[in-house]
């Protein structure tokens, strides 16, 4: 069984609030975390790092893995429906993630290094609620 180290970094004094359906957000982050874990070779000590921060009027969440990275041939295609680099699955995960984020005026992008891993970034507009006033 592969071992996985999980780091979570955020400012505990900061209030993070977005306007989105909780089930859809769960789907977004389950998919990104699962993909990150699956990208790590069995021979490697797994590391998954999640960070939440506020920048301007946005909340940015990054999910970084130390997996194999995204192959050059897949760059530009990973958010397309039915595109997959896995032997199982239908290739809908990241396309659904992007669609959910588009619906809530969010964004997704990534940075990858071959053999070293990938970082996915998700940005949401901040929701100003009564706790912020």
Image: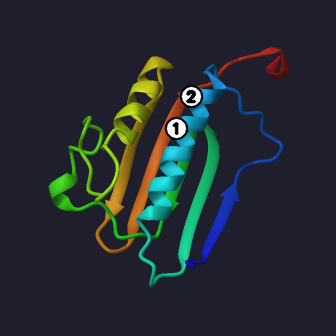
Pick whichever, 67 or 10, lies toward us: 67
Residue depicted at 59% across the width and 32% down the height: 25
Q: Position of residue 41 (x, y in %)?
A: 41, 76
Q: Position of residue 39 (x, y in %)?
A: 41, 65
In the figure, 76 relative to 20: above or below? Answer: below
Crowd band around label 1 with a 10 angstrom C-alpha radius: few (<14), some (14–19), many (20+): many
Cβ atoms at labels 2 and 1 below 8 Å apart: yes
Can residue 58 be seen here? The reply is no
Can residue 114 be seen here? The reply is yes
Please indicate whether residue 47 sits to the left or right of residue 131 in the image: left
In the figure, 47 relative to 1: above or below? Answer: above
Residue depicted at 20% across the width and 53% down the height: 74
Pick whichever, 19 or 44, lies toward us: 44
Q: Which residue is mark 1?
A: 28
For the C terminus, the image quarter is top right
Q: Position of residue 28 (x, y in %)?
A: 52, 37
Q: Which residue is mark 2?
A: 24
Q: Seen from this angle, which residue lies furthest front?
A: 88
Residue depicted at 33% across the width and 55% down the height: 88
């Amino acid at each position: 069984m592969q071992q996985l180290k999980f780091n979570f970094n955020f400012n505990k004094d900061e209030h993070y609030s977005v306007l989105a359906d909780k089930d859809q957000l769960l789907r977004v982050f389950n998919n990104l975390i699962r993909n990150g874990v699956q990208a790590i070779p069995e021979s490697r000590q797994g590391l998954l790092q999640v960070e939440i921060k506020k920048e301007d009027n946005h909340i940015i969440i990054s999910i970084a893995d130390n997996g194999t990275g995204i192959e050059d041939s897949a760059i530009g295609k990973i958010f397309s429906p039915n595109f997959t680099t896995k032997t199982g699955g239908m290739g809908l995960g990241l396309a659904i993630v992007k669609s959910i984020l588009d619906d809530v005026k969010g964004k997704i992008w990534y940075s990858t290094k071959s053999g070293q891993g990938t970082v996915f970034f998700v940005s949401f507009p901040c929701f100003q609620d009564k706790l912020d006033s």
